[in-house]
Image: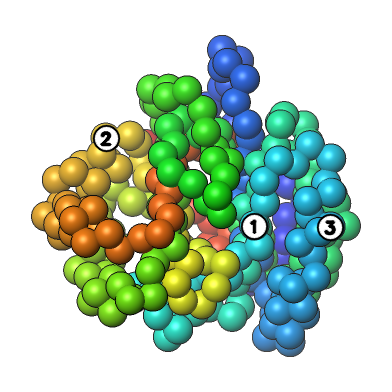
Amino acid sequence: MAKPEPHGGYHRIVSTEDESPRPFVRLDVWGVRPGGVARALLRMGTQRLQLRRQPGITFTKLLGTSSGETFTMRDADPRHWAIISTWSDEQQARAFQGSSIAQSWNSSAQEQLTVLMQPLVSRGQWSGREPFAVIDKKAAPGVIAAITRARIKPKMWTKFWSSVPPVSLDLHNDPGVVFTLGIGEAPVGLQGTFSIWRNAKAISDFAYRRPAHADVIRRTHEMQWYSEEMFTRFQVLDVTGTYNGKSLTIET
């Protein structure tokens, strides 16, 4: 497995020179060694306040991860943990790699994947906030990421879980998707998916032309499955590091 990279030189995927001011968002995923799981769990409970005090940070969440195939406990991956963070400028976002928080994760990790991005369009809320709210912007040519996240009403858990498998199968087999990861603040009830796509057309085709996904969207609104939900698309700027020992190969 690859060691965590110092992230001193990111691979720039798209320029931001002509951007109006937009936050910078980074997702860090650490693959911990077998002996590091207990320390990862401890950090999940103790680093929240420290994270919020980072200079320039405006929103952050410590996250568990999963395969996202069923969004039940059997999907949970105790070897991979994540932090999503929003920053007021790019320099501060990149500087997080050298923070004591990132270094504490690196100390027990055998790999790290980092995705740096900027929001293009966002709908809904996360914990009562709109962390990626921006004026809608058309995607530039290049790689797109998406986060879908929801707080599922307890009485709707079984209906949600029964609807996940066909959508998950479609997602994992879609030729336009490069990477998918289940994310969540809790093992059940607070569910999300992070995905990377070859381009904007690929994600739009999946969202609106796949029958299983379209049916779930229709039913979530008709039956009011969620007490809170959010969907955000991002322009991907950089992808560095590895996940399960492999670098992400992205061909737009």
Residue bearing the label numbered 2: 201
Q: Is residue 17 left or right of residue 121?
A: right
Please name the residue shown 84% across and 49% down the image.
53
Of the residues shown, which amino acid type is indicated by label 2? Lys
* N-term mark: 1 or 2: 1
Of the residues shown, which amino acid type is indicated by label 1? Lys
Q: In what element is the residue under mark 2?
A: helix
Q: Tell which of 248 and 210 is nearer to you.
A: 210
Q: Which mark is residue 61?
A: 1
Q: Is residue 74 left or right of residue 165?
A: right
150 up-or-down from 38: above or below: above
Q: Which mark is residue 50?
A: 3
Q: In what element is the residue under mark 3?
A: helix
User: Where is residue 65 shown, x and y percent of the image?
Assistant: 53, 69
Please name the residue shown 33% across and 34% down the image.
200
Instruction: Specify the quadrant of the image occupied by residue 154.
Output: bottom left
Can residue 106 be seen in this snapshot?
A: no
Q: Is residue 79 left or right of residue 91?
A: left
* N-term mark: 3 or 1: 3
Of the residues shown, which amino acid type is indicated by label 3? Gln
Badge nearest the viewer, 3 or 2: 3
10 up-or-down from 223: above or below: above
Query: Which quarter of the figure is the C terminus placed in?
Result: top left
Q: Residues within 10 Å of mark 2 (few under 14, many from 20)?
A: some
